[in-house]
Each structure stands twice: as structure tokens, then as C-alpha cells.
Amino acid sequence: MSATTVAPVAVKKNYLTALNEALAEEMARNPLMLCQGEDIGKLGGAFGVTEGLQATYGDHRVVDMPISEAAIIGSAVGMALNGMTVMAEMQFIDFISCGFDQIVNMMATYHYRTAGEVHIPVVVRGPAGAYGGGALYHSQMNEAWFCNSPGLKVVCPSTPYDAKGMLKAALRDGNPVIFYEIKELYRKREIEEELPTEDYIVPLGKAAIRREGKDITLVSYGQNVYHCLDAAAELENVGVSAEVIDLRSLVPLDEETVFNSIAKTSRVIVVNEAPMTCGFAGELVARISTKAFHLLDAPPSRVTRMDTPVPWVKPLELHVLPTVDKIVAEAMRIVKF
Amino acid sequence: MSATTVAPVAVKKNYLTALNEALAEEMARNPLMLCQGEDIGKLGGAFGVTEGLQATYGDHRVVDMPISEAAIIGSAVGMALNGMTVMAEMQFIDFISCGFDQIVNMMATYHYRTAGEVHIPVVVRGPAGAYGGGALYHSQMNEAWFCNSPGLKVVCPSTPYDAKGMLKAALRDGNPVIFYEIKELYRKREIEEELPTEDYIVPLGKAAIRREGKDITLVSYGQNVYHCLDAAAELENVGVSAEVIDLRSLVPLDEETVFNSIAKTSRVIVVNEAPMTCGFAGELVARISTKAFHLLDAPPSRVTRMDTPVPWVKPLELHVLPTVDKIVAEAMRIVKF
Amino acid sequence: MSAKSGSATAERAEQAIKPSQNLSKEDCLELFKQLYLARYFDVRLIKEKKRGRLRGTLYSSHNQEAILVGSLFGLAATDWISPIHRDMPAFFMKDFRFGVDNPNRLGMSIEEVCCQVWGKEGSPGRARDNWSHIGSKSKKIIHSTSMLAGTIPVAAGVVYADRMQGGNAVCLTYNGEGSTAQGIFHEAINYAAVHKLPVITIVENNQWAYGTPVEMECPTPDVADRAKGYGILGLIADGQDVFDVYDKVMQAVEHSRAGNGPSIVECKTFRAYGHGDHDDDRAMKYRPAKEIEEGRKRDPIAVCRKRLIELGYLTGADKTSYMAEGKNAGESSNDDFPPEIIEFMNKGIEFAMNSPMPAAEEAEQWVFWDGDKP
Amino acid sequence: MSAKSGSATAERAEQAIKPSQNLSKEDCLELFKQLYLARYFDVRLIKEKKRGRLRGTLYSSHNQEAILVGSLFGLAATDWISPIHRDMPAFFMKDFRFGVDNPNRLGMSIEEVCCQVWGKEGSPGRARDNWSHIGSKSKKIIHSTSMLAGTIPVAAGVVYADRMQGGNAVCLTYNGEGSTAQGIFHEAINYAAVHKLPVITIVENNQWAYGTPVEMECPTPDVADRAKGYGILGLIADGQDVFDVYDKVMQAVEHSRAGNGPSIVECKTFRAYGHGDHDDDRAMKYRPAKEIEEGRKRDPIAVCRKRLIELGYLTGADKTSYMAEGKNAGESSNDDFPPEIIEFMNKGIEFAMNSPMPAAEEAEQWVFWDGDKP
Ligand SMILES: Cc1ncc(C[n+]2csc(CCOP(=O)(O)OP(=O)(O)O)c2C)c(N)n1
Ligand SMILES: Cc1ncc(C[n+]2csc(CCOP(=O)(O)OP(=O)(O)O)c2C)c(N)n1
Ligand SMILES: [Mg+2]
Ligand SMILES: [Mg+2]
């Protein structure tokens, strides 16, 4: 080690590391914060999001839970009721169905039921999303269930910067947050980026414009943001300028950014990988149609998963999911409308 | 008793009796049908929908289950797998959250996962809906969760005739059906009607036009159909002719009837009592906007529950729910658009 | 070791098992009066409902009062409780003593509870949810949803957090025997057992879950047998005997507080009416009249009275004043209860009736917290 | 009663407890060979995965084969099973006998199972879901989801329906010890116990649930203790000893088939690798190397061999041929397995590799049933 000061080499970090840093920093910042989940201790979680936390903060603050999603969530609510902040990990977001009642009926409503006496700083987070061959039970995006359950914030970052900043914001929010992490992005090299060394948060409820454009707006979140960006690149080749918005947060929703974009483009496609019927894409289409009808020069559109489960083998999986090709084709249809 | 033949007195039946008859007739028709739920035997269920069934069909076919919603649903799936047809009652539809995983992951997907080898004739039914002071946990309309879970049919009758015909259709459908009964309609005198003496079904997936009109289309289901009809009556007084459509079935959805109506009226409001965000009203608005945009002369609209739980005391409850006044006001806004 | 010290040890052991033997005369009479209070609350609400002044469903705690009174009596003020639908009196009886006007006491006032029952603004939850779904963070009462057994994991989390913050609180959760069939019962108790959390689950075994008898809910002879599956302490109390409930709950509380993990205390009792007041007539369909009659015989007030007479704490006219026992709400009159209890209740009801309803617009509020971020 | 008949009774009781004592030499050698088959299937798939020819995760059943082989051997063809992630060999070993080419047998062919593993059209589920999630109504194998313990209620429903239709089938459900913490485990077994349904839950206690040790999942010394909470039969088997597994499972099956309700058979074993093949390296983080070494010592093939030698069923060169025991996949070669097993497996793999993938458009199909209405 030399005493000479050298310019630090810029270190790019992946989405997974960003999440891990968020947890480590919040645990350090808030002695009443606790993490619990299955295999999150010594193992550091199925994907390593909690890597190293137990070694630093002990097994009372980083707790390996029995395979009991409902108890993981319900006890987190109890801890929150008694002054703590809790990160509750679902090993895969698909398993949230096993703790469903505790989320929608116990956790989501606690603040409301008590007319504000109690608030519940619990973040339920877990790996989500398809495209990785996870099949029916390791691929879900089931965010619509929770968007339809008042009292929950629902968010989904798509970049390392947002992953860290939004997880920190969620842990400080004071409301229960369902935090969708995109497991296919965890270690994706192409999206690694430098992260600020100082503390920062990304406020929940603010969308980001990922690419500016003037002919059509593509709105998305999670993995599909990258599909939209790729589609935008292809569309550029045929002279169509697409704006790409990353919602980041579904509840609360940044309608303003979306409407401003449509004011410019007059055309919109919402893209997400959840089943179509009663999914969030439909919700956004409904918001746009009811509130920004006058801005539209063509019908609003959506590209979503078909109303099927996510099948296993690749050709089947891709057949039901949004792809760059499908987005491009739909954009061309809408632009020519 | 006289031997003289007298014209039989027309007997009007309520929604509850209609359901009870449907179950009794299907149990008689299908020796491999079974009913299970909490307190459905001697008691006949919390509301009496299964009244008398155990006395007729025995406690092996009409089974009082432990308070275990997940086991009620999961075992029904097992019975279906092994050749039976099952009616599984949720004492209130709100408690379906406790059996959620078995519905969305086990039952809904069974046919898909087995590439068609297995189908699951299970009807999960229960009392639903607000307006009765049931508060957060005895008022829910949580149909959107299931509409977003491919493989489930989701229906909600609003009349005695439909209640009977659709429950019979559901029990014969061969697919899992989530059957929403409106408990405020169970004993509502105003809607009692004569039922056919012969066997009949009302096919799932067909909407009904409850009132013809030409200026605006009000689409709804369940209790809100009556709110729409009342609103239509009020609107008539001010010279607005409203068509009222009762969807009856959400999955599958009768888009044609809706679109045909809008072709006539060019204006539409979707009304339902579920929370707005990611609710079915939004889904239908999205379908209309994406597929029938050209038919619209005004933005499509929705009147739904606010994004809150259902509070207990009457003024609060009505404040968050659709009411006749709110529908009329919104219709006037849209008509003048 | 002398014979004497040996017998002293045995005596101590005996005392440890029956803490009620150490209760003073005053305490015993307090318990007796608390039984009246719990009973009167219920009787009075039934009457108020019959007069049509109340909405919502009353799940009567009639005949089950010894469970609430006996289990709450020995708690520390800093302990938590989690009552459910049949436990309305618990909300104001937590940390309660007659005549002691402790401004710091950790229980609700009767005024608050009546405001809840009447759906008024003064309810701790501003009447957003009904009847037994109130609670209070500051008073350490967990708010239930309707979903049975759903508060047990919350209770476990509460005491976990308490322990983390240096506390030594226990939490009593109340559940019917039918509710023990829920999956969450298992998950929560299993978790609590693994982490040795001081959650005491009081099972109020009143033989019926709505219209379903206990043997259709639970496969073992005693519901307390469920404890064996977790290797935790399981006790059975005579739910009609406030002293036995007190003893068994105290034993469980001490066991759990000492770091030995959760416990289950089954209190055998008997449901006096239908499941809820809407079910009183229909209950005859599934429950033989004779069974009801039989059950009525061991009224907790009568059982307690008998014991107090044996102890010599009730003598003379006191022995027979206020004969509330064995009477259902219709048969009871105010003469069956001590005047101060009637007055206590009157005050609560009057307050509630004079309170405003919450404003309709409140319904939009408190979906999300918007307070100072920590 | 004479002393003789008394001792005969005792002998019968002993036999009832150890049905394996009645197994013929042929049966015993069959069991031995089946252990090789289960082992080879796993070893071979690990190699195929390492070669990159497979997608999805393999949850190795290495070292746990005696549980599958021993529990399946005594079932009637009409019985149901419900295997989960670590039980891949069960799919083709149900109702299996070497050399018996029974066209009506109620198990899958190795071809079908390999098609599933390779994601091909010939999979019973046309490769819509992965690995262990296959099943077959006609072959009486329940299809699992990923949600642990989620098939137990389905199993209960299946046997309920069987009983209603005049059958006498039992259902074996397989679960890891960690999975017993799920709420649905409780709801399903409680329901089965109330209705005395013949569901036998085999708990494969391999000491670890992914990265969590059994004592963090289950508070009792034995997982079989969970049976006590339901008053049902709970047995413990040496999961390394195919004969002991056979005995205990047969005892449970007979008990359950006779109408005594569900049972739990805990088979104590030890996980040979990481949780899944993705976890092999990471597993060293939470599991001491010594523990693994220790666990390897009682390889089920070795335990079985020893017993067969004692019985005199293996002699001479047979005693030491095919030394698969104690070797992990990397250490094993085809020389460690009987040639007919290798051939059996080769046939399956070859079939799978030559099978087409399902067409992409199939993904839209079978969301809803559209067949003849009943
Ligand atoms: C999860 C769930 N399922 C069903 C119900 C409907 N329900 C309310 S009370 C009750 C019976 C409860 O019986 P028990 O637990 O014995 O309590 P008791 O009413 O006898 O005190 C039922 C089935 C519910 N509230 N929650
Ligand atoms: C409900 C649910 N939660 C979490 C998981 C993730 N998961 C898959 S296997 C596993 C460990 C299972 O351990 P155990 O039951 O002991 O079985 P083993 O793998 O050891 O055979 C976990 C946590 C899951 N599949 N389902
Ligand atoms: Mg009860
Ligand atoms: Mg295990």
C-alpha cells in the first residue's frame, strides 16, 4: 500500500450489489431495523442480496426464518407495530401468495384501521420476473394483486442506481412497500453503473424518462424497459422517434410524466410482462384514456403477457411474453393509425 | 285439499333460494358432486345458501370443514383431480385471501400445467360486496386478483334467474370458477322473480342488456347494476337515455355486447365497487380504449370505489363507494363532454 | 436436608402451580366484581342491540368471562394482548382495577370502547372497522382483522421487537378452538417456538366454531394437545373458574417470560348463545337445547361465588347479593349487578351516544402514512 | 392361553412391525438394484447438466434414495403419490419392477421423465413446467407446484374422492423437513386427521432446508413429533436403510388404509450436495465440510449391501461388484452401476434428445378446458 493519493478507479456495480449496499447502509443507519427471510443469514439469500449482513449485524437482526411466508410477513407487521423497521424477503416473489392474507388484510390496512395511530414500515421484497426459464412459479410479476389492495406502495426499479435509492427510500417510507426486484437484472453486466458514495434516495412515485422521443411514448417498468429501449432503437431506424418512460413506481404513480410525454407524442403503448387482464398495463391505459383522452391521436395500446401462466421451455415462454419484435410491430401499427 | 286443478300461484324467489336450488339440483344430477365449507352442514351456511343439503345428501357429500380455507380449496382440487365436482364455499369471499395460493397457483394452473390431461371442476363461491356495513373484512370485491390469474373464470350474477343459471353453468363448466354472490341481494325483495321449473343454465361469458338507451352506456355487474338502473331512471328525467349492461361474467368477457352498445351511444362509464387501481373497471376501460377507440365521442370513464378499504360506519362507507348520485354526475359530465 | 425444608419446597412448588393461593382477599373480591363487569357489558349491549341502537354483530362473551378476567389479572401493564371477536371486555379490562383511577393505565376506557361499539368518532379507530377490531399501540393491544388466528404472528413480532429493545413483555393472544385449524396458527406458533418467543395462546374452547363442533375442527381430545406438536407447554384450565384460569395463565406467562418459548392454555368453556346475535335462533338447529341448559349450570360468577364463600371472603348478605349467574340477558335486570358497574357502563354509553360520527370525508384519509420520515 | 401361542402372538407383532422380514430374496435384490437405479439417474443427470445439455435446477436425491425406493416398494398400483423437488426418481419408480414389462403399470416411463428433464414434447406436461412438476392423473401421481407442502391438501382430496368412489387408496406425499413449517401442512393434516383420510406424509429430513438447519425450522427434537399435535401416528425411520423405510412406511400405510387417519413418517437422512446444483459451492458457506464427510459414511447402497450379505443374498463376487456407494457424481463412473441400469437410462435420454420441443404456439393452449361438459 502506498501513501500516495491515487484517483480512485470508477467501480461499476450491478443491481444485486446495489440492493445489498442499500440494506447494509440502512441497517447501519437504523439500529431498529431488522431483516428476515428464508436462508438470508449465512447463505446470504438465494441470490445473495443479503450477503454478509448477518456477519455484521448478528443473527438477531438478520434472521433465517422457517419456510413460513405468512409468519414472515405477519411477524414483520408486529415488529413494525412495536417500533421497528423490517425488510421481509420472499425467496421468490412468487411465494408471496403463501403470505397473501397477512399482506392485503393485516399489513396494508393497519394504518387505515387505526386512523393513523399505527404505521407499518415494512418492505416485502423479492426476485421477480420472467425471461429466465423459471416457469410458472419462478417467473411471476403479480404486482396487480397489490396495486388493487389499497394501502400498499408497489415499486419496481430497473437500474442499479434506482435499486439502491428506491430500496433505501422504501425502508424509510413508513408505509408497507412491495418491492419487485428483477432477478434477470441482478447480475446483468450491461446495466452496471457507478453509484454515488454518499447517501441518496430515489423518491417513490417518480417516473424516469429513459429516452426522449416525439412520435410515440413507450411506458414500462422492470425488465421491459430494456425491451422498450431496444424497440426504440429499432424504430429509430425506420424513422420513428419513441420516448421511453420507466415508471419505477406503480403506487404511487407519476401520471404527470406520462401525460406530459403523451402531450408531445399523442401516442402511447404500455408494456409489461404480467398477464393482461387486470394487470397494471390496463390500469395505466385506463388512466390515460379517462384523463388524457384529448391528447391521443390513436388508441392507447398495451403489450403484455398473454393471459397464460409462464411456461417453461424458451419458445413457449417467449411466445406469451412481450418481446422487442412485438413492441416494434405494435408501435408501427399505432404510429400508422 | 281439493282435487280441482287450480292454476299454480306464481312463486317469486329470491337470489338466495335460487342459489340453493342450483346446488340441490346439481347435487341430485351429479352423484360425484360434493359441497364443502365452514358450517354449511346442519347450519346450512352463514346465510343459508346450503340449507337442507346435508339432510338430503349426507355429511359425506355436504361437508363441514375446519376453518381452513387453503385446505378447503386444496382438497377440492384433489377431489376434482380424482373425478369429482366440488362446490367450495368461502363463508365470506373476503376469507379467500387465506386460501389464495391454492387458488392461483394450484387450481388455476392445473389444466395448463398438465397440457390438458387434468381439468378442475371446482366452483369457489361466497358472499361478497359492500353497502351493508360489513367493514373491511366483510365487504370485499376482490375479483381483480383472480382476473389477473390466468385459468380462472370469474363471474358475478345480479338476479335470481342468473344466480341459479350461472351457478349451474359454473358447476358444469369443468374449469375452476370464482363465483361472486352479492350478499346484499340474497334476500332483496324487489328483485325476486319466478324461476323456470325446468332445468336451465345461463352460459358464462354472456352479458345482459338490462335497459336500452342511446346516449350513454353504463356497464356494471353485481350490486352496481341496480345503481346504474337507478341512475338511468334519473338521467331519463333530464333527457339522457342510458343503456345499462350487466356483464355477469368478467372472465370470459362478452366484449361484443359492450362494443355494440358503445357503437350506438359513443359514450361509456364502467361502474364497480372494487378499488379503482387495477380493478376490473379499469380493465374494461382499457379494452374499450384499445379496441373500440374509434367508437368513442368522449373519454371512457369509470366510477369505482376509491382506493381505500371499505370503512364501517355508513357515511364513510358510502363516501368511498359508487352511488347513484356519483354515477348520474359522471354521466352528465361525459354526456356534455 | 431436613424433612421440614423438603415440605417447604413442596409447598413452594404447590404455590408456583397455584398462584391464586397468594391472592389477597381484596384481589379475590376484585376478580369477582370484574366478572360482573364483563357480564354486564355483554348483557347491556345485547339489550341495546335489541332496542336497535347498535349496528354490527355482537359475539357474546357471556359465560366465558372467567377466561378474560382470569387471564388479564396477572399481566404486567407493559404486556401486550390480542383479543378477538368474542373478547370485547378485554379492551377496557386490560390493566383495570376498580376504584383505581390510574391515568397511565394501559387499557382503554369504557368510553372509548362504547364509542367503538356505537360507531362514533371517539373510537380508538374512529369507527373505521367494527366492534372487536380496535386496538392501541400505546396501550399495547393488537388490532385484529377478521381473519381468524391472524394476529398470532403479529403478537410474535411484537414480543420479538420488545426483546430487541430490552423489554420482557409477553403477549396473550386469544383464539377460539376452531381458529386453531388455520395455517397461520401453525406458522406463527412454530416460528415462536423456534425463537422461544413469549406468546401465550389462550384457546377459548367453547365447543363450537359457529355451527361446527370442536371434533370437526380438531382431531385430538384436547385442543391443548396441539402444543405437543411444537414441544411447547400446553395447559388446560377450567374456563368457568376464574382462579384456575388465573393459575394456568400465570404459569404459562412465567414459563414464557423466562425464555422457554410460547405456550398454549386451553380454557374449556361453553358458548352461551348463538355464534353471534344474528345466530341465536338458528343455533337451535345444530345445538341441542339440553346442551345449552347443561352448560349454563357452571356459570363463572357462581363458581367464583362458591369459592369466595369457602374462603370466607363472602359472608352474610354479601353471599347472595347480585345474583347475575345463570341468567341470560333477557332474564337479567340491573338488580343483578352492583350499582357501580351499572354506573360505569352508563357513563360509557352516554359518552358514546353524545359523541359525533366521524365525518364522511375521513374515509379518504390514512390510506398512506405521510408523517415525518424516521 | 399357552405360552407358545403367547410367543407366537409376540412374533406376529414383531412381523407386523417389520414387514421387510417377509420379503423374498428376489424382493431384497430388487430393492438393492432399485437403489442403484435411483442413484444412477441422479449421477447421470448431474453429468448431463455439467455438460450443459440441461436447463432448470436439479435437486439431487443422492444419498436419499432409500426413502423413495423403500416407500414406493410396498404400494398398491392404485395408490397415489405426490413427489416434490428432490424426488425425481419417484416418477418412474412408482409401480416399477426390473424386467417386468407391465403395460398397465402405474408409473411413468423413463422416456417420459427424460423428456420432461430435457424439456421435450414427450413430457407428460409437454414441458410447460419444469423438472419435478410433472404428474399424471391416470398414473395417480399428483402434480406439485413450487409452493412447498402445497400438495398435501390435494392428496387429502384425492383419497377422499377415492373413498367416495369405493376405493381404498392411500396417498404418499413427500416433503422436506423445512416444508413442514408451512401453514398448509397444518391445515391439510388437521383436515385429514379429522376425516381420517389415508394420507401418509413422508418427511425427508435431510437436516437442511436450503441454507437453514432443521432446528431453525422445527422446534422439536424429531420432526415426527409434529404428529403428536394431531394425535396421529408418527414414525421415525432410518432414511439410509431401505428396509427400515419400507417397514415404517408399510406400517403407516396399513394404519392409514385401515381407517385410522393420516400419519407422518420421518426418514432421517442427509443432503449429499448443495440445495440444488446451483448451490454446490455456496453450500460450503453454511455447512461444515466435516458434516458432509460424516453424512456420506452411511450411503444407502452400502447399508443395503451389508444387510444382504448378512442375509446371505449377496455372496462371492456379487458382494463387491458395482461399488457406487460413497462416491459423488464426479467420482462415479459407469463401472459402478449394473449395465442394465445404464442401458435403461441411455434409452430414456436418447429418446428425449431425439424428441422435438413443443411448438411455441402451444403456449396459448390449455388455459381453459373446453372439452365435453359432463
Ligand atoms: C379465516 C376465517 N375464516 C372464516 C371466518 C368466519 N368465522 C368467523 S367466527 C367463526 C367461528 C370461530 O370459531 P372459534 O374459533 O371456535 O371461536 P368462537 O366464535 O367459538 O369464539 C368463523 C368460521 C373468519 N372470520 N376467518
Ligand atoms: C412456499 C415456498 N417458500 C419457499 C420456497 C423456496 N424453497 C424451495 S426448496 C426450499 C427448501 C426446502 O427445504 P426442505 O423442505 O427441507 O426440502 P429439501 O430441499 O431439503 O429436500 C425453499 C425454501 C418454496 N419453494 N416454496
Ligand atoms: Mg369456539
Ligand atoms: Mg431438507
Image (cartoon, coloured by chain):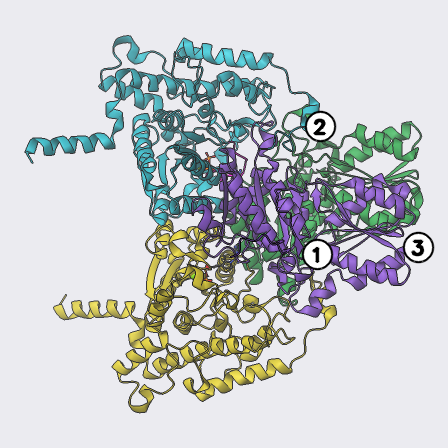
Chain colours: A purple, B green, C cyan, D yellow
The chain under label 1 reads A
In which quarter of the view is residue A133 placed? Answer: bottom right
Is ligand 2 less than 8 Å from the beta carbon at label 3?
no
Q: Is residue B281 left or right of residue B316?
A: right
Compared with residue C232, is residue A222 higher up or lower down, i.e. above or below? Answer: below
Mark 2 element type: helix
Residue lying at 25% horizontally and 9% vertically, measured from the top left: C316
> Are discs 1 and 3 less than 8 Å apart at CB?
no
- Spatial CA distance of label 2 from label 1 is 40 Å
Residue farthest to the front? A4
Q: Is residue B258 left or right of residue B170?
A: right
Q: Which of marks 1 and 3 is nearer the N terminus?
A: 1
Q: Which residue is disc 3 drawn over? A: A337
Residue farthest to the left? C2
Bounds of the magenta segment? C143-152
| Amino acid found under the numbered disc labelled 2 | Leu
Mark 3 element type: loop
Foreground mark, 2 or 3? 3
Q: Which residue is disc 2 drawn over? A: B318
Q: Nearer the viewer, residue C49 or D201?
A: D201
Question: Do the residues at discs 1 and 3 belong to one chain?
Answer: yes
Q: In this view, does B206 lie to the left or right of D5?
A: right
The chain under label 3 reads A
The chain under label 2 reads B
Q: Which residue is disc 1 drawn over? A: A223
